[in-house]
């Protein structure tokens, strides 16, 4: 069974930065395409970013230029570096395994809450 | 890229069938055979129930089925059970630039 454990969420002021982590196994991070998906309180799901093999990355327009997805296979961890945060970024952030070019998110973590507020 | 359009809510009695629509465009749902559906219970992470328009992951009951016609995908839940009460989201590939777009979500109530 795939295990994904997010951490790093919390309260941050507008304009601030935060780095989220998603811990998993070596097998999972080396054989899967990894995604971040978020959900604002009481709202729907929004895809945020994906990292493919070879470090190819894609981002939603809403976070492009502000968020950076990366992974450290040796630490079996996926990251999401977030900067220039606004209240609209307030959400539960989930990491999820995926497939190349398919919206097939098979396994999800439990999520970590990011609150952007002064 | 706007979210795909889903009805806000649908309801049915135990044993009945309900169908949730997901309307997109010729740039997403109508262009690729890549539509998935997710079930989310309150306070829980989403769970995939359909991928590639019609395929069911292992362990998902065959009461869940998917289809597509033009720019609209649909999820049908047959023989509705109390445990099916949840929020459901569709998701489509939308090309390399936009990548993935989710639907607005549908609350399924078992009355």
Image (spheres, grey):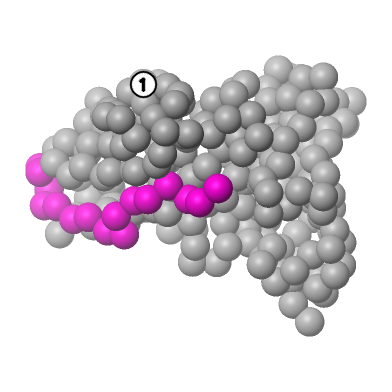
Magenta region, mostly helix, strand or loop? Answer: loop
Q: Which residue is mark 1?
A: B55
Q: Residue at the spot x=70%, y=71% of the render?
A: A87
Q: Which residues are magenta?
A: B1-16
Residue ID at (58%, 30%): B95
Q: The C terminus of chain B appears in which quarter of the rendering?
A: bottom left
Q: Chain of mark 1?
A: B
Q: Residue at x 78, y 82 (%)?
A: A118
Q: Which one is nearer the viewer's eye here, B26 or A63? A: B26
Residue A75 vs A26, above or below: the answer is below
Residue lying at 81% horizontally and 73% vertically, measured from the top left = A14
Is B32 covered by the magenta stretch? no
**B71 or A18: nearer the eye?**
B71
Vertical order, B65 against B24 (above or below): above
Q: Position of residue A55 (x, y in %)?
A: 82, 25
Query: Is B3 in the magenta?
Result: yes
In the displayed structure image, the side of residue A2 where residue B90 appears, left or right: left
């Amino acid at each position: 069974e795939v295990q994904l454990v997010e951490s790093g969420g919390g309260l941050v002021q507008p304009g601030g930065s935060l780095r989220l982590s998603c811990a998993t196994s070596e097998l999972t991070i080396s054989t899967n395409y990894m995604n971040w998906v978020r959900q604002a309180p009481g709202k729907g799901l929004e895809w945020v970013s994906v990292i493919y093999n070879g470090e190819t990355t894609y981002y939603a327009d809403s976070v492009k230029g502000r968020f950076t997805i990366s992974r450290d296979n040796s630490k079996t961890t996926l990251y999401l570096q977030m900067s220039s945060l606004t209240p609209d970024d307030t959400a539960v952030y989930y990491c999820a395994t995926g497939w190349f070019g398919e919206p097939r998110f098979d396994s999800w973590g439990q999520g970590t809450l990011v609150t952007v507020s002064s | 890229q706007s979210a795909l359009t889903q009805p806000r809510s649908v309801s049915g009695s135990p044993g009945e069938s309900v169908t949730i629509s997901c309307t997109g465009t010729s740039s997403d749902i109508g262009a690729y055979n890549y539509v998935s559906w997710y079930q989310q219970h309150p306070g829980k992470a989403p769970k995939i129930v359909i991928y590639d328009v019609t395929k069911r992951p292992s362990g998902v009951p065959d009461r869940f089925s998917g289809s597509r016609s033009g720019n609209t995908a649909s999820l049908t839940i047959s023989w509705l059970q109390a445990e099916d009460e949840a929020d459901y989201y569709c998701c489509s590939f939308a090309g390399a630039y936009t990548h993935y777009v989710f639907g607005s979500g549908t609350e399924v109530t078992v009355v």
